[in-house]
Amino acid sequence: MSEQEVVAATDRPATVSSLVRDLRALGVAPGMTLFVHSSLKSLGWVAGAAQAVVLALQEAVGSAGTLALPAHSTSLSEPSE
């Protein structure tokens, strides 16, 4: 789906503050350890894109929390190599 299609299919963009509200509604609280594997596309239109999502996650767990995100590379996925 193109960026234009994502924008057209979304009522309004998600923002850092709206993402934090959503995370709170899901039970994310300051001081938690949060392991996140997500798809930016699945969030729809996010003002600020991936950076806004990371900022929201950081704000949701706060300075006492821990945020872990996997880093995958398709070029490093074959164990025999």
Image (tube, rainbow, N blue to C red):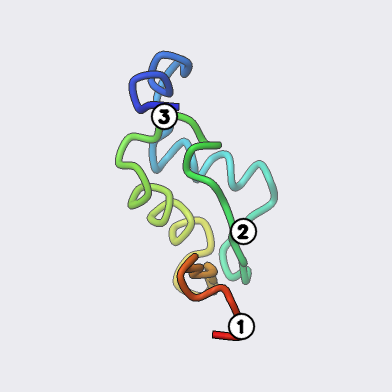
Secondary element under disc 3, as helix, strand or loop, is loop
User: Is 15 or 36 nearer to us in this picture?
Assistant: 36
Q: Is residue 5 above or below residue 33?
A: above
**Badge nearest the viewer, 3 or 1:** 1
**Badge nearest the viewer, 2 or 3:** 3
Q: Which of marks 3 and 1 is nearer the N terminus?
A: 3
Please report the residue visible at 35 percent of the width from the left and 27 percent of the height from the top: 3
Q: Which amino acid does label 2 sit on?
A: Ala
Crowding near the residue tagged with mark 3, few <14, some 14–19, many ≥20 C-alpha atoms within 10 Å: many
Q: Is residue 47 above or below residue 34?
A: above
Q: Quadrant of the N terminus?
A: top left
**Extreme bottom residue here?**
80
Q: Which amino acid does label 1 sit on?
A: Pro
Identify residue for label 2: 29
Identify residue for label 3: 45
Q: Residue 79 carries which label?
A: 1
Answer with left or right where residue 78 lies relative to residue 3. Answer: right
Q: Is residue 55 above or below residue 79?
A: above
Q: What residue type is labelled 3?
A: Trp
Q: Earlier in the sequence, mark 1 or mark 2?
A: 2
* CA gap, disc 3 and disc 1: 35 Å
Residue 76 percent coordinates (x, y): 49, 75
Residue 46 percent coordinates (x, y): 39, 35
Residue 18 percent coordinates (x, y): 47, 36
Secondary element under disc 2, as helix, strand or loop, is loop
Q: Do the residues labelled 1 and 2 touch (CB within 8 Å)?
A: no
**Extreme left residue here?**
48
